[in-house]
Image (cartoon, rainbow, N blue to C red):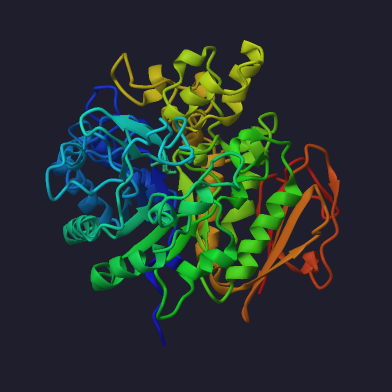
Amino acid sequence: MEQTKWFKNRVFYQIWPRSFKDGDGDGMGDLHGVYEKLDYIKSLGCDGIWFSPLYPSPGADCGYDIADYMDIAQEFGGMEAFKKVLDGAHQRDMKVIMDLVVNHTSDEHDWFQKSRQRIDPYTDYYIWRPAKPNGKLPNNWDSLFEGKAWTYDEVRGEYYMHLFAIKQPDLNMDNPLVREEVKKILKFWLDLGVDGFREDVITFISKAEGLPNDYIMPASKGLNLYNHGPHIHEYLTEFKRDVLDNYDCVTLAEAPMVDPKTALTYIQEGPKQEIDMMIQFQTQCADSFLSDYYPMPFSLKKLKKAFTNWQTKLDGKGWNMLYLENHDHPRIISRYGSEKFWKESGKMLAVSYLFQKGTPFIYQGQEIGMLNWRPESPDMYEDVQTIWEYKNHATNKSDEKRLKRLWRSSRDSARTLVQWDNSPNAGFTTSETPWFHVNPNYVDINVAQQEEDPDSILNFYRKAVALRKKLSCVFDGNYIEYNKNSNKLYCYSRRNGRQKILVVCSFSDKPQRFTAPKDFHTDLARLELCNYPESDPKKLKPYEARVYLWR
Ligand code: GLC
C-alpha cells in the first residue's frame, strides 16, 4: 500500500515574519522571535510552518520582492538564526516550508541590475520590450499593484514587465537559464533541510506567446493571458523531474482564479502530478467580487458553495489545502463572523473549516481571533497595493468612505503585530518604535490573556486541532453537505467505515432552529466540541458551532 504523504496528516501555521515576534529588540519581527515561540506553535497542535519570505529584500512588497534567493535577511537574524529555527522545528517534529517567489524578483536583484545593462547571460532574464514608435506601451496589460504592467528603464532604454509592483520585474521563465536558476534555488533550500515550498503566484510564470493585447478582461487586463499560460505544465514538470522528485518535500501553489477542474490539471494524484496542493481564492470571495477591493455583502451560500465544491470535486483525486486567513486578506472574524460575537464567531469559523478534508493552515493571530486594523489615517498604511488603491480608486468619494474602504480591503488589516500580551506594543518588541502598528484592541485580545482562560479562542483552537487529529473520519471520510439552501447554517458530515461526525455552524447573530439531518440521531452521539457550555438540541445560539461524533 502506498504510504500516506506526510503533509496530509499535518496542520500548518503561517508566519509572516515581520509582524510575528521581535527577538532582538530592533522593532522588526525575526527568527530569534520565532525560535522563542516554537513551543507555542507546537502547543496549538501545529506540526508545520510556512514562512512568508525571509530573504534579503528592499521590502517594496514586504519581502515578496527578493534581492537574493540564497540567503536569509540580516534583519531576520541571517542564516545562522534560520538554521537554529529549522533544527528547533525538526526536533519538535515540525516541518518547515519556504516561500518560493519566482514569478518576479526585486529590481535590486543582481540579475536585474545586469540585465538592464545587457550583461550576459542576464540580458534575457526578464521580459524586455522596446518602446513602440507611437509611444504606446508594449501591450495593454495591467499590473495587479501599480498601474500598467510596463515600466520604462532608462538604463536599458526598454520597457520591462511587472505583473505586481514597479519594483518587482517579472522573470522570463521561457529562458532555460532562468529555469536553471529556479532549480538551483530549490536545491539549495532542500539540501539545507527545508521540507518544501509555497510557490507564490506560480500559475503566472508562463506568459502567452507574443504577449498579445487583452480584449476580454475589463480590469486586470492580461490575467487570462498569463494565468495558466502555455508552458506552465511543462515548467512545473521540469522543476519536479529535475529537483523536487529527488526529495521528500511538499509543494503548495498559490493560484489566483483557479477552479477545482483547473486545479486538478496540476494536483491530480498520479504520474503526471506537478504540485501537491493549491491555494485557491474561491473561499475568500464570499464577500467580494474577485478581489477584496470590490466588496460585497457576505454571502454564506457563496462560501458554502466554494467549500463544498472544493471538497467534492477534489475528492479521491487531489488534496485540499484549507485556510481562512493569510497575509493577503483582511481578518476573517471581521468579514465572515461578527466582531460583536467575537469569541463565538471566532470559534465557529475555526470549526467551519478544520473538519474538512485536506491540510489546514492557521495564519498568525487567527488562533486568538485578531480583528481588522482600522487606522485613523491613510498615511499609516504600508502595503504597496493599498497605497496605490487609495491614490487611484474611488477618489470621488469622501475621505471617510475612502478610509473605510481600506479598513475593509487592505492587506494591512491583517498584518499588524501579533498580540502577545497587554504590555506596550502588545509584547511584540522591547523597542519603542516597532516597524508597524499594533491594533489598539491588544489590551483585550492577546495570547497571555487567552492562555489563562480555558474558554478562550486560543484554547478552543487547541481543542479543535487535537480533535481533528484524533478522528480518522476527518482524515479520510467522505464529505456531505446538508441544509444547502440555508443562508444561516453550514452543516456537513464526514464519514468513514468506523465513525462519522456531523459539523454544525451557525453564521447568524440570532438563535436558529436546528434539526439534524435524517439518520443523524444526535441523542445517540457525543457532542465532542461546542463553543457554548450548554446546547439545546433543537436550537442554536448565535454563531454556535458543534461537532457530534458517532462510533
Ligand atoms: C502573492 C503573495 C503576495 C504578494 C504577491 C506578489 O499573492 O501572497 O503577498 O504581494 O504574490 O509577490
Give the tally of numbered discs: 0
In the rendered view of the protein, which quadrant contains the N terminus?
A: bottom left
Residue at (45%, 41%) from the top-left corner? 139
Of 326 and 13, nearer the camera is 326
- Classify residue 382 by image quadrant: top left
Of 248 and 86, nearer the camera is 248
Location of residue 358 with respect to 514 vertically, above or below: below
**Ligand 1 found in image quarter:** top left
Location of residue 515 with respect to 408 vertically, above or below: below
Q: In this rendering, does residue 357 appear at all?
A: no
Location of residue 229 with respect to 461 vertically, above or below: below
- Classify residue 480 by image quadrant: bottom right
In the rendered view of the protein, which quadrant contains the C terminus?
A: bottom right
Location of residue 193 in the rendering, given as x and y in whole percent from the top left corner: 20, 59
444 left or right, relative to 77: right
- Classify residue 525 by image quadrant: bottom right
463 left or right, relative to 518: left
Of 361 and 218, nearer the camera is 218
Location of residue 309 in the rendering, given as x and y in whole percent from the top left corner: 66, 62
In the image as oriented, which residue stretches furthest toward the bottom? Answer: 1
66 left or right, relative to 488: left
Location of residue 360 in the rendering, given as x and y in whole percent from the top left corner: 50, 56
Q: In this rendering, does residue 323 appear at all?
A: yes
